[in-house]
Amino acid sequence: MTSTPFRLDGKVAIVTGASQGIGLAISVALADAGAAVAVTNLSSKQADIDALCTQITSAGGTAKGYVLDITDTPSIKPTFARISQEMGGLDILVNNAGVRVNRPSLEISEEDWDVVLNVNLRGTFFCAQAAAAHMVAQSYGRIINVASQLAVSSSPGRAPYVASKGGIVSLTQTLALEWIRDGVTVNAIGPGPTETPLTANSTPANEATLMARSPLGRRQTPEEIAGSVVFLASDAANTITGHHLLIDGGWTAG
């Protein structure tokens, strides 16, 4: 272990869904720790991608933006290969991109189900697969998947989302076992209620219910989530793999 085990100098990280919310905070935290960060998101988020790259580089970090739709599976491998070539490697992947549909299960359509599972679970797998091809070849890599506290503590009206996040935890464990002897660790984080664009439209009634249930008594900030990713990407977590790290303000302890 190095004398500064939480530093990521010389590492190249890809963050999906990186231009807002938790993905933005993770990208900034990785850059602050010394990693060069490939900021990826949909083409409709190009302005946000550019703004985040400017934010990171203005603070002395290294970042470059890339358009990536993780539901377009054939585009993932060439995009990752381009990032590796242009940024000098591929050492860390943070599978952060995610969507959700809040609706009673009796009202969930096939389209609702497919939209959520295609982004959250299918996209996570194929991004991990593409990154691992680089990482296994170099006998080093860190993959961190963004799951949820709802993977282990469910909630009504969110069946596709909960299923996808539970699937991410199981997928994380499987990939961890497959790749650990190749020098690649695979872990997940499980954020609890957090202030993000996905939660911006929460009703006062929902917020009151959440606050009454939450031991913390408030939503977490994205910045409070990001440090866990730096830890799992660092040398300090060399032998941690297959783990789902809950960052939920005590929610699942209750």
Image (cartoon, rainbow, N blue to C red):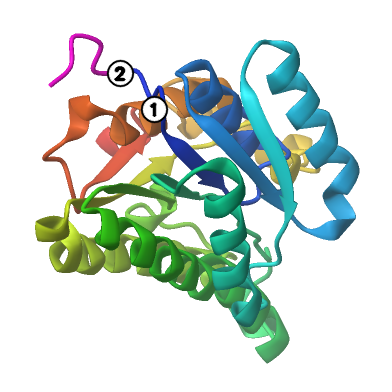
Dot 1 or dot 2, earlier in sequence? 2
Front position in the image: 195 or 48? 48
Indicate the secondary structure of the residue bearing disc 2. loop
Q: Which disc number belongs to residue 230? A: 1
The kind of residue tagged 2 is: Phe
With respect to residue 154, does 29 lie above or below?
above
Using residue 14 as the reference point, say whether residue 46 is left or right of it: right
Name the main secondary structure of what is drawn in magenta: loop
With respect to residue 211, does 83 lie above or below?
below
The kind of residue tagged 1 is: Val
With respect to residue 196, does 147 lie above or below?
below
Q: Quadrant of residue 75?
A: bottom right
Front position in the image: 100 or 41? 41
Residue at coordinates 55% horizontally, 75% vertically from top-left?
117
Q: Which residues are magenta?
A: 1-6
Give the labeled residue for mark 2: 6
Using residue 216 as the reference point, say whether residue 53 is left or right of it: right
Local crowd at mark 2 within 10 Å, few (<14), some, or many (≥20)? some
State the image coordinates of residue 135 (x, y, percent, origin top left). Answer: 32, 56
Q: Quadrant of residue 130?
A: bottom left
Q: Are marks 1 and 2 in contact (CB under 8 Å)?
A: yes
